[in-house]
Amino acid sequence: MDILSDEHEREEAVRKWWHEHWKPIALGIAIAIGGLIGVRQYQAYQLEQSQQDAYAAYQLQSQIFSRGTAAFAAADQYLQEHEDIYGAMLALDMAATLIQGEKYDQALKYITFARDHGGELTAPQASLVLARLQGQCGDYSAAMATLDGLANSAYQAEAAEIRGDLFMAQGKSSEAHDAYAQAIAHYQAAQITISPILQMKFDNVIESGDKPAYQIMAEQIEAQNAGESGAAASES
């Protein structure tokens, strides 16, 4: 997007861009989360568990990556025998495959399995993806309930952002505004940089008197840089 000198023109450009692109971005995030959990956390966790079960799951995971849903029959059998972390990790890979094929209703089954059987290693992230999928399928009340059931307070910002997306999908811009503002507040409190995507979401529903998210982020970065400079000066 070109740099615009007039702030009003910039905000209008953000609104137009986000209106056209928010759906594929939301789904892309769900796919990315599923892949991240299914590969990286699995590889870290398997070192601490039964090598035999881990290796069997790894083989099925490889088949899913290479053959897609054609490998689901054997994977489903594994899930029946492993309602545990191994099955949860494999279920996430299966869900990610279905999401990429836009088979959202089928993916719900596997994301739910991962949430219910993976413990704290997968439950929070799987709940976030589940809520997005439920929203994609039009079951907004179920999606909100999933987010309400997210016990881990470390994911409050992500949950608030997804609530905003769900409200946007229903045309409830005022509720979306409040949810995005809450997400930004959580990130600020945790001193975590606000993502460009969240900035666009908030600026798309900005209300009179609001400070634009890109300005909030600029101030946040400036404060962080000042803090780092102060720490460096004190050390020297």
Image: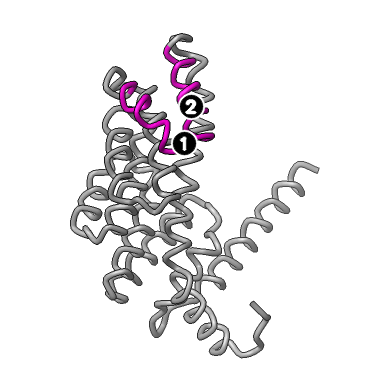
The front one of 187 and 83 is 83
Q: Quadrant of residue 70?
A: top left
Q: Earlier in the sequence, mark 2 or mark 1?
A: 1
Residue 66: within the magenta? yes
Q: Quadrant of residue 193?
A: bottom right
Q: Image point 31% across, 47% down: which residue?
A: 130
Q: Measured along the vertical axis of the image, is residue 64 above or below residue 145?
A: above
- In the drawing, does residue 196 fall left or right of residue 235? left
Which residues are drawn in magenta? 53-78
Q: Are marks 2 and 1 in contact (CB under 8 Å)?
A: yes
Q: Quadrant of residue 174?
A: bottom left
Q: Label 1: which residue?
A: 37
Which mark is on residue 42? 2
Question: x%, y% of residue 101?
Answer: 42, 50
Specify the quadrant that holds the C terminus. top right
Specify the quadrant that holds the N terminus. bottom right
Question: x%, y% of residue 229?
Answer: 73, 53
Question: x%, y% of residue 191?
Answer: 52, 52
User: Which amino acid type corresponds to the residue marked 1 in the rendered image?
Assistant: Ile
Residue 203: within the magenta? no
- In the drawing, does residue 14 fall left or right of residue 149? right
Q: Measured along the vertical axis of the image, is residue 47 above or below residue 38?
A: above
Q: At numbered mark 1, what does the secondary structure look like: helix, strand or loop?
A: helix
Which mark is on residue 204? none
Q: Image point 38% across, 65% down: which residue?
A: 180
Q: Residues within 10 Å of mark 1 (few under 14, many from 20)?
A: many
User: Which amino acid type corresponds to the residue marked 2 in the rendered image?
Assistant: Tyr
Q: At numbered mark 2, what does the secondary structure look like: helix, strand or loop?
A: helix
